[in-house]
Image (cartoon, rainbow, N blue to C red):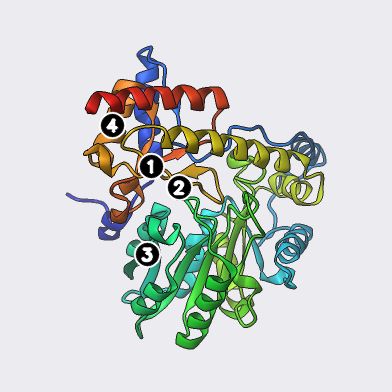
Amino acid sequence: MDTLAKATGRLGTETAFEVLAKARALEAEGRHVIHLEIGEPDFDTPANVVEAGIQALRDGHTHYGPSAGLPQVRKAFAEYAGGMRGVDVDPNHVVVTPGAKPVMFFGMMSLVDPGDEVIYPNPGFPIYESVIEYLGATAVPIRISEEKGFSLDVAELAEKVTPRTKMLILNTPANPTGGVSVKADIEQIAELAQKHDFWVLSDEIYSRILYEGQHQSILSVPGMKERTILLEGHSKTYAMTGWRLGFGVAPRRVADMMARFMTNCNSCTATFTQIAGVEAVTGSQAAAKAMVEEFRKRRDIIVDGLNAIPHVSCRKPLGAFYVFPNITETGMRASELADLLLREAGVATLAGTAFGAYGEGYLRLSYANSQENIRLALDRVREQIEKLH
């Protein structure tokens, strides 16, 4: 007897964790594998944040807290999110979550009904499509193309909007491409959202990992606070992936519903983690800034190295810590080349198709690894691709 609910068949996964498992299996056999597959900073959490977490434990922050987050934490996160975006954020509009994914899940659960249409970036973070389909809504992909600089094409978005459009998912800086939407595009997207009355889930988890200019948030556009769910968190900026700390900013009625989902699902986010998270955003930013500068150096190394490999071309990303090289001239499909590089070269990468059908012809490489390992990986990739021709 099939005991799983039918809806579970619509729930996807993250290929990065599957490739990581394959890579670990090879390492268990004695193989040396360079990990460029997982989207996790290879830095430790800043020392001041760790100390704040330890002190919070010693001070007894080991009990339940309010489902939406500790009041002082919601206030600190409201000031942090609003300050960098030039808007006033009411702490009552902030919901603190264990990681940023619940903001995505609870936000969509609060607003999206079966039959609604949700436009999402493709290639894009795979959990977007997974949650849309799980909820019984219609997932409408919008192509994120290299020709457009891996930013969302506003003209194409206008063509995708229908009377059934309930939400757009916007991700800038973006995973997997490192693409960034400019201010003019953000303003036009906001105009479409207000004209056609749809919501925007703005995934800005990489907002602080930006190499040029200032971060542009749709939350900053007049009239958008009333129809935007901002997704933010600490995992990337502060190398806190294992702490599980994120937060959302949304209109009060949506924030209250997200808090109710927290009550039903998680009860609350770990209180000592929340205290550490306040130190992260209010304390010294030196470690976070140093990490971004190191990512910048690695980005330049990996982009130059990939562009020096025959049959490979790579656009320089403006944000996040991924490159999305074009491998169509190798003559191999993305999944085939990714498997080959892992099996023969000991370099773990992800096929572009792990992020949607429009990712065919590309690989995603994370440069959250040392300069030494990146250079070694480039040598191995070059050697393997040269063997193909």
Whole-number angstrom distance, CA of label 4 to CA of label 3 = 28 Å
Furthest residue in direction left, as rendered: 1
Decide which of 149, 59 is in the foreground and name it: 149
For marks 4 and 3, the one nearer the N-term is 3
Query: Is residue 207 positioned above or below 326 on the image?
Result: below
Residue picked out by circle 4: 339
The crowd level at tag 4 (other Cα within 10 Å; few <14, some 14-19, many 20+) is some
Are the two marked residues, 1 and 2, in contact with CB atoms closer than 8 angstroms? yes
Q: Amino acid at mark 3?
A: Ile
Callout 1: SS: loop
Crowding near pointer 1: few (<14 within 10 Å), some, many (20+)?
A: many
Q: On the picture, is 61 further left or further right than 17? A: right
Tell me the amino acid under the disc marked 1: Ser
Q: Residue at x 65, y 42 (%)?
A: 292
Helix or strand or loop: what does disc 4 sit on? helix
Mark 2 vs mark 3, foreground winner is 2
**Mark 3 or 1, which is nearer the eye?**
1
The disc, 2 or 4, on the residue closer to the chain's N-terminal end is 2
Please identify, in this view, whether the residue under mark 2 or under mark 4 is nearer the observer: 2
- Evaluate if marks 2 and 4 touch, with contact meaning CB atoms under 8 Å apart: no
Which residue in the structure is indicated by mark 3?
Answer: 132
